[in-house]
Image (spheres, rainbow, N blue to C red):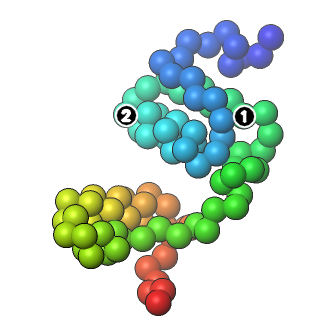
Amino acid sequence: MSAAADAAYDLAVVGGGINGVGIARDAAGRGLRVLLVEKDDLAAHTSSASTKLIHGGLRYLEYYEFRLVAEALAERELLLRVAPHIISRTSHT
């Protein structure tokens, strides 16, 4: 039996797609002991087809959703800070 099977965890995440990995990362960042299980390579399926686009929420301005704009901008800034190797500030039209 593997060491992972004998260890105690606070959270088990099944699926290593973008959502599973994001949840696992967030939980680990909050101090939880996390087990992430995936039958294939991480991001091998749905996540591999992602556009990798991270937007600032400006599309929500059209509907006067200022709270969503602020949340999206804050999330983008967080991602720029924690993952600068995969995210850049570029303008797409």
The label number, if any, that marks residue 38 in the structure image: 1
What residue would you read off at disc 2?
Answer: 30
Provide residue 20's location: percent of width, then percent of height: 57, 39
| Side (left or right) of 90 relative to 47 | left
The label number, if any, that marks residue 63 in the structure image: none
**Residue 73 visible in the displayed image:** no
Q: Nearer the viewer, residue 4 or 36?
A: 36
Please name the residue shown 44% across and 33% down the image. 27
The nearer-to-camera label among 2 and 1 is: 1
Q: In the rendered view of the protein, which quadrant contains the N terminus? A: top right
Provide residue 60's location: percent of width, then percent of height: 30, 69
| Side (left or right) of 40 relative to 67 | right
Residue 9 to residue 57: above or below: above
The number of discs equals 2
Provide residue 50's location: percent of width, then percent of height: 63, 62
Tell me the distance, in whole angstroms, between the alpha carbons under discs 2 and 1.
22 Å
Please name the residue shown 22% across and 64% down the image. 65
**Amino acid of disc 2:** Arg
Residue 45 to residue 78: above or below: above
Element at label 1: loop
**Residue 91 visible in the displayed image:** yes
Q: Earlier in the sequence, mark 2 or mark 1?
A: 2
Provide residue 12's location: percent of width, then percent of height: 57, 23
| Side (left or right) of 14 relative to 10 | right
Please name the residue shown 33% across and 62% down the image. 72
Q: Nearer the viewer, residue 55 or 76?
A: 55
